Image: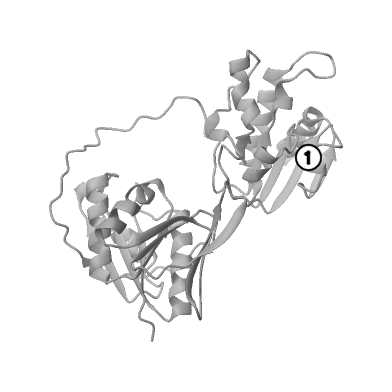
Amino acid sequence: MSTETVLYLAHPEADGALSRHSLEALAVAQSAAATLGATLVVGLFGADVRAAANAVGACGARRFLAVQGPEFATPRYATDTAAVEALARAAEATVIVGAHTSRLARVAAGAALRLSGCVDTHAGSVTAGADGLAVTRWFYKQRIEGDVRRSQRPWIVLVDPGAAEAYAKTAANVASEIVTVAATNNRTQTVGLREPGAGEQTIRPEAELLFVAGAGWTRRQKDGQPHTEEAERLILDFVRASRASLGSTKSLTDISGEGQAVLHCLSHLNQVGQTGSTPRHAKGLSTCCHGEEPHVVGWRFIRERRAVNLDPNCGWARGKADVLYVADAFAVMRELNRLLAAQ
């Protein structure tokens, strides 16, 4: 019988449900506990975690622990760290697995310090074998993959999105054990939420397709003139019709500082690559990008890569794309949008 106890740690979203990212982390925790022969415990914290607990009630956990109340409704370092610490102590956890959300990432190191434990973030996988538990993660701007093994306990591991298939949402009513958290310094208050009024949502982490626009969209075309307005219309029409997530290269998000025309639908939040995000989508379609290494590194976890470029000798043609279409992206997207509109 294993001496390990695996605690699955999560917080519900504003609607009371667990995100897909959190359900992926639950699948990782289940697999690690089963392989180790360890006890699985679910620990949830938030304003009201009953719906979230019932949603994963049939996951095979031996215990369900909850820290809940209005003071845990919104992210706050003091209360969230106290909640994580209390859940870990109540579960007597040796391994704590959670999703790498902004909320958990903010408090994981502080909680590990209070528990005299350790923490690893951005885990790509968690495996268990005869030699114990191993966490796989990337180093040096995702160019080197390494396995991390630690003897120190408790060990907090935050799993990157897309690292596993999500838990299948088998629901069952459960009675959670309420864990009491001692009063903490709650000087930080959430007074409201502000969102940028920059238009429609184009970043969709759960989309099947990632569509990336490169700097070629804003450059001079066959007639010697740029067609930025048409480019933006073609891109947005495709993203709306396909429900794809929209990305861009660093060069495209930076050209505004060079006095060039810009696509207003793109910002640094859309940036994919070495200095941007590293998304995980089933498919990726790159248009007007040259397939340079700083950009392609952001495609490391895209399973199927296709590109549209007029240059047959671009970086995508050198083994970085599964399929390269040597064509005019404007013409290709016009035809794609026509086909999508006809469906």
Q: Nearer the viewer, residue 197 or 100?
A: 100
Q: Nearer the viewer, residue 147 or 58?
A: 147
**Could one spot residue 263 in this view of the protein?**
no
In which quadrant of the rendered image does the N terminus lie? bottom left
Q: In the picture provided, is 111 more to the left or to the right than 24?
A: left
Q: Is residue 181 above or below residue 276?
A: below
What's under tag 1, amino acid-wise? Answer: Gly
Q: Which residue is mark 1?
A: 315
Q: Give SS at disc 1.
A: helix
Q: Residue furthest toward the bottom?
A: 1
- Which residue is at 55% across, 49% downward? 206
Instruction: Indicate the position of residue 188 as horizontal and vertical percent values.
Output: 21, 38
Q: Is residue 43 above or below residue 15?
A: below
| Res. 117 image quadrant | bottom left
Instruction: Indicate the position of residue 107 as horizontal and vertical percent values.
Output: 32, 50
Instruction: Indicate the position of residue 224 as horizontal and vertical percent values.
Output: 82, 13
- Which residue is at 31% across, 58% downward? 112
Q: Residue furthest toward the left?
A: 183
- Which residue is at 21% across, 37% downward? 189
| Res. 150 image quadrant | bottom left
Colour option used: one colour
Q: Nearer the viewer, residue 92 or 270?
A: 92
In which quadrant of the rendered image does the C terminus lie? top right
- Which residue is at 54% across, 38% downward? 203
| Res. 215 image quadrant | top right
